[in-house]
Amino acid sequence: MAKQHGLIAKFDTPAGIMHAAEKVRDAGFKKWDVIAPFPLHGLDTAMGIKRSPVGRFTIVGGTIGLVSGMLMIWFTSASDLSLPYMEGYQLIVGGKPLFSPQYAFPVAYEMTILFSAFASIGGMFILNKLPMHYHPVLKYKDVAASSDDTFFLYIENEDPQFDEDKTRAFLGELEPLEVGELEE
Amino acid sequence: MASAHSITAEVKPAILDEVNPVDIPRPALVGHNRSFNWITEKICGIVEEKTPTWWWVCFVLACGSASFTVMGLVYLVATGTGVWGLANPANWGWAIVNFVFWIGIGHAGTLISAILCLLRQKWRTSINRAAEAMTIFAVVCAGIFPVFHVGRVWMAWFLFPIPNANAIWPNFRSALLWDVFAVSTYGTVSVLFWYVGLIPDLASVRDRAKNKIRQFLYGIFAMGWRGSNRQWSNYEMCYLILAGLSTPLVLSVHTIVSFDFAISLLPGWHTTIFPPYFVAGAIFSGFGMVLTLMLPLRAIYRLEDLITQYHIDCMTKIILATGTMVGYAYTMEFFIAAYGANDFEIFAFVNRAFGNFAWAYWIMISCNVISPQLFWFKKVRQNTAMVWVITIFVNIGMWFERFVIAVTTLTRDFVPSSWGYFSPTIIDIFTYVGTFGVFSVLFLLFLRFLPLMAIAEIKAVTPQADPHKH
């Protein structure tokens, strides 16, 4: 038999998975997860998941976007700097000052949003470790139903509290439809 | 006196001791209390079924129509922008009109997906996917016009600050360059937002796939999504942030599009009301287009339980509200012209309503201001055929709005010796009609290959998704 990855329990109602998640959280397990077809309201609290840090990526991306937008406009139309492969050019338009943040704002603003969006999505992919085309859960026999109407909860055998028999009995107490084994 | 006393006794105190909110049932967002599985089957079924005959008929017609645009553009590149009816004084003709028209259409998609998401309007879930697709395809159609309007289209890359041998940089003081950044950012972020929304649903299609090729292709794009709640947590935050970013983005894009006109010095264009008025108009036309597309789909795919009468009511009410705002803006332009006591400004507006383009002006007023007023009546909102016809009027009216703005001002500028009349050429007409084909081709491909509704999001707003309900 293939190496065991953990134990998985199947539920068919949001209430069932929610109560089960609360009990697993309170039992002190660390390496476990819930598989759901849609984001369940309140499940993060039930699992004890902290607020997602995606926003930190966004603020970094946004700041880079704003600064690089302003610098780009200053360099191309208000400076006479010489950089490798490109040179600034002091472009006088209508006798106005070479640079002012007002006229640079619309473009810098759009770049702020563009960079923020890329950073948020990049951050989400990094935090979720996507793309990940192989995962033990995806191999479980009826996990395909998890993108339809079924909920799963699994505890990895890497978890410090994991004990084959005790954990199986514990999962059984959560009133699942069935408890199965996840293979590596 | 006795009767007066009894009246005061009936009056309720201003501050109640306790508040008993009336238990008004919220309208169901999914009709007939459908199960999760029904939703999956219904939406994935559309992608999985054998390609229906009507699809092929529409696809062939759309390709034929799209070829008009292709031929029009080939002829333009081979000959010059003169093949469009652009001549002094109207050097902005249908190109800018069509550009603003299509960009405006796109705005409802972002409004539905971003602003309604922030406002927690749950009814958005069954229309946001198709509306976002509409946004992206509308931006594609919009982009064609300015890019080819530059004349030497092979030099269009000069619009971007790319280091080149001549050391020429674009002029960042020009609103047209702001447009380049606004529209390209808008297109990119719309695609990203759409794709992020698609990931869980692509996973649904992947899990249901019957053959290896399908499983592989949908699998690649699903990124190995497995619906883990630790992933959902980050995903939801990312989606919320994208909604938060798209909201100022969509407002800024049409603001910047209106700057193309507003920061010039021409009477009729040089007004501060343009940004809010353009944004309201964009949302108005976009919702018109969403309904134009979704009502036939609802009938063909029997989606009445997912796009309920409540959804149609919400959208028609937004059309009514924004249509009225647009009407208010038209009136306010006249008021400001009169109040500003600037002869040129007054002339520009009187000329708009009663000059040689008065026909276009009154088409605009009847389609944009008068026709949506019918949505005050419940009977009209419940009559799908009538709603559809009115949305067509909205689309026509909004095209004429841009035409009126661009053309009346250009053909009657400060110097009477340069006054003229604008007439489109056959190439103008072909190129424009063809963009509807381009749009339809893309939209039909979307219907065929991607889930047209956000499956996971719809499930999340059904009553049985509430874990506290037993």
Image (cartoon, coloured by chain):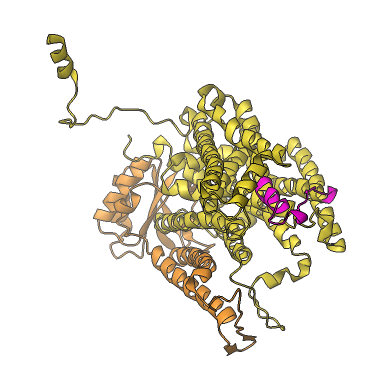
- Which chain does yellow denote in the image? B
| Residue B295, above or below B451 | above
Question: Is B406 covered by the magenta stretch?
Answer: yes
**In the depicted view, which residue is nearer to us: A136 or B407?**
B407
Spot occupied by residue A109 in the image (x, y as percentages of width and height):
50, 66
**In the depicted view, which residue is nearer to us: A96 or B274?**
A96
**Observer able to see residue B211:** no
Query: Where is residue B244, by image quadrant?
Result: bottom left
Instruction: Answer left or right for A181 relative to B23.
Output: right
Instruction: Answer left or right for B225 relative to B151.
Output: left
Spot occupied by residue B6 in the image (x, y as percentages of width and height):
15, 13
**In the depicted view, which residue is nearer to us: B43 or B101?**
B101
**Residue drawn at (23%, 29%), measured in percent from left and top?**
B20
Question: Is B416 covered by the magenta stretch?
Answer: yes
Q: In the figure, what tint was chain A given?
A: orange
Q: Which residues are magenta?
A: B404-427
Query: The C terminus of chain B appears in which quarter of the rendering?
Result: top left
Spot occupied by residue B191 in the image (x, y as percentages of width and height):
58, 57
Q: Residue furthest top?
A: B2
| Residue B237, above or below B50 | below
**Residue drawn at (28%, 55%), measured in percent from left and top?**
A25
**Observer able to see residue B429:** yes
Instruction: Answer left or right for A2 relative to B138.
Output: left
Query: The N terminus of chain B appears in which quarter of the rendering?
Result: top left
Q: How many marks?
A: 0
**In the depicted view, which residue is nearer to us: B56 or B379?**
B379
Spot occupied by residue B306 in the image (x, y as percentages of width and height):
53, 34
| Residue B170, above or below B233 | below
